[in-house]
Amino acid sequence: MPEGALLIDCGGSPVQKLRRAGVDPQALVSVVITHIHPDHVYGLPALVRNLAVLGRQAPLTIHCRPEHVEPLRSLLSLFSTLERPGMFALTVRAIGLAEDAHAFDLGPLSVRTSPNEHGAMPNFAVRVDATRGRSVVYSSDTRPCDAVVALARGADTLVHDATYSERDRGRAGGHAHSTAEEAGEVAARAGVRRLILTHIGAEYHDEVDALAEEARKRFAGEVEIARELVPYPL
């Protein structure tokens, strides 16, 4: 099976950010797009274009939900980054929609997925297990749901949506996201070792420590706030 790097979701300036994170962009073998809200996908045409400029020859596979295959192909075509003459092979491939579905293997990594609950936007969570026994689960954008609990059961690390404070729980439900306390409850139910809170709303950026404390009300393990370009070894 191929070996290399895996990118889950693709925001702005992906090649520059990969380099700042110490990852060679040419090492990418697979990209997973959990859903097609702009903050998760708008950097994809830039990624493909920049890899072509860098002289990439190896193929690249983009994994997504079945209903997002054609929208992603259209997005890439809009920026003339799909099926250009002389460009590397680019495949957009649908994942299975069953809970805990095996998506693909990448060297020592096994990738599985489960649909989550993100309102009107179809979405899915991702679990990556390494052969040495550690695993990480990324909830993507979601309200608390049993499917993410099941996917994360026994994982080392859960990276979970914590868009809102508990005082705004109604907003979280209305917008199909989670509060920090709800993320803590999911982590506790799944029995993970560490919870990393992500997708925090801009209005809370001055109170991230308070959000971490909210999560600790429900979860006794490690709680951290996701920091951009900071490595989180398993």
Image (cartoon, rainbow, N blue to C red):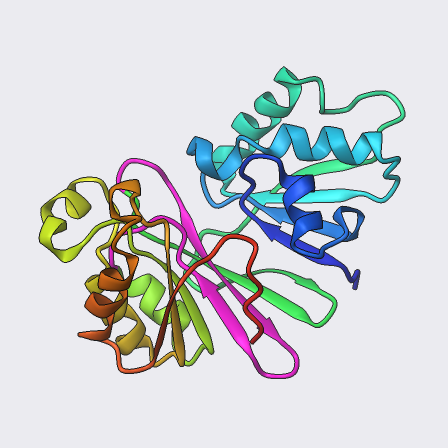
Q: Is residue 16 left or right of residue 85?
A: left
Place of residue 29 in the rendered image (x, y in percent of width and height, measured from the top left): 74, 51
Where residue 123 sits, quadrant-wise, is: top left
- From this view, report whether residue 142 is shown above or below residue 80: below
Place of residue 18 in the rendered image (x, y in percent of width and height, measured from the top left): 67, 48
- From this view, report whether residue 125 is shown above or below residue 185: above
Residue 131 part of the magenta segment: yes
Residue at 66% from the left image edge and 79% from the top image edge: 131
The quarter in which the C terminus is drawn is bottom right
Place of residue 103 in the rendered image (x, y in percent of width and height, measured from the top left): 58, 58
Q: Is residue 60 left or right of residue 190?
A: right
Viewer can see residue 154: yes
Q: Residue furthest front?
A: 206
Residue at 23% from the left image edge and 74% from the top image edge: 216
Viewer can see residue 36: no
Residue at 12% from the left image edge and 51% from the top image edge: 169
- From this view, report whether residue 14 is shown above or below residue 224: above
Place of residue 146 in the rendered image (x, y in percent of width and height, measured from the top left): 27, 65
Q: Viewer-proximal residue, 221 or 61?
A: 221
Q: Is residue 32 left or right of residue 179?
A: right
Residue 162 part of the magenta segment: no
**How many callouts does the rendering have?**
0
For the record, the magenta segment spans 119-144
